Amino acid sequence: MKLLHIVAFLLVVIGAINWGLVGLANYNLVEMLFGSVSGLVQLVYVLVGASGVVLLVTHKSDCKVCPKM
């Protein structure tokens, strides 16, 4: 479970940086890296989205700041 959390966290950070670059500079890092392979670009986006869902669902049990209920 720890490995899943680490991978999900890294993918969400990559996604956040990519969206920040898109918003600030209209520069899509994912498409720049995998531009000619549209299926791979879509896979990266799906993995980033799935990682966000994993972090959302598991946040309460992983977070050391949020109060335990």
Image (cartoon, rainbow, N blue to C red):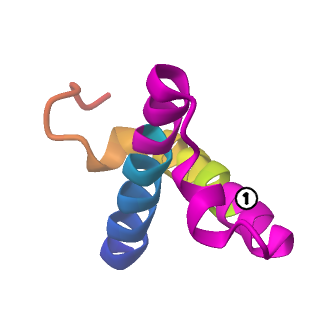
**What residue range appears in magenta?**
17-46
Q: Nearer the viewer, residue 57 or 23?
A: 23
Q: x, y percentage for residue 59?
A: 39, 42
Q: Is residue 31 above or below residue 49?
A: below
Residue drawn at x 55%, y 46% as measured from the top left? 52
- Name the quadrant containing residue 1: bottom left
**How many circles with numbers are drawn on the protein?**
1
Q: Is residue 65 above or below residue 45?
A: above
Q: Which residue is mark 1?
A: 46
Q: Is residue 20 above or below residue 60?
A: above
Q: Quadrant of the C terminus?
A: top left
Q: Amino acid at mark 1?
A: Val
Asked if residue 65 lies left or right of residue 54, the reply is left
Residue drawn at x 28%, y 50% as measured from the top left? 62
Q: x, y percentage for residue 39?
A: 85, 73
Q: Residues within 10 Å of mark 1 (few under 14, many from 20)?
A: few
Q: Nearer the viewer, residue 2 or 14?
A: 14
Residue drawn at x 24%, y 41% as measured from the top left? 63
Asked if residue 67 lies left or right of residue 13, the reply is left
Q: Give the dominant element type of the magenta stretch: helix, strand or loop.
A: helix
Residue drawn at x 45%, y 21% as measured from the top left? 24
